[in-house]
Amino acid sequence: MFLIVLGKVGFGVKKSPYKLLKVTIPEDLDYQREFEEVFNQYALSYELQKVKTTDLGSLYELVYLVSLYYDADEKEFIDALRCRNGNLNIVLGMNVER
């Protein structure tokens, strides 16, 4: 019975290394180059999944799939992004399957 419960909750299952990152930026920011240095420092890989306009087109919401280095400090990563996006919203989601 105990093993069944552990199996149902996913205990011991390897987590996906990918996380969903949502970054809001002003419309005049060059998002294709602005975050490259930060991603190279903290992420093994990153891929832009979606670009969406918000706030009547004055802002963009970027959605990335990122795989951070094992020893990367997530708070430092988010702080480095905040310095580049004008302190607008950033969401680093839980592990996702690729």
Image: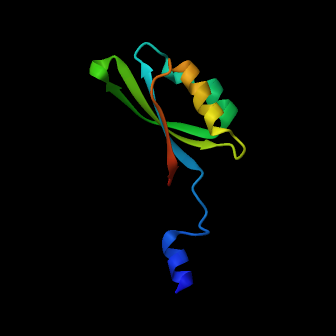
- In this view, the residue farthest toward the right is 71
Is the residue 44 above or below the residue 12 in the image? Answer: above
Residue at the location (66% across, 31% down)? 40
> Residue 72, relative to residue 35: is it above or below?
below
* Above or below, 32 relative to 95: above
Image position, residue 80 (x, y; %): 61, 25
Left or right for 76, reference 82: right
Residue at 63% in and 27% down: 38
Classify residue 41 by image quadrant.
top right
Q: What residue appears at the point 34 percent right and 16 percent down from the top-left corner?
A: 58
Residue drawn 62% across the image and 38% down it: 74
Q: Position of residue 33 (x, y in %)?
A: 56, 21
The front one of 81 and 52 is 81
Q: Position of residue 64 (x, y in %)?
A: 49, 37
Instruction: Measuring from the top left, give residue 91's x and y in whole percent.
Output: 47, 36
For the question of whether residue 34 can be seen, the reply is no
Give the residue at the far top of this rendering.
28
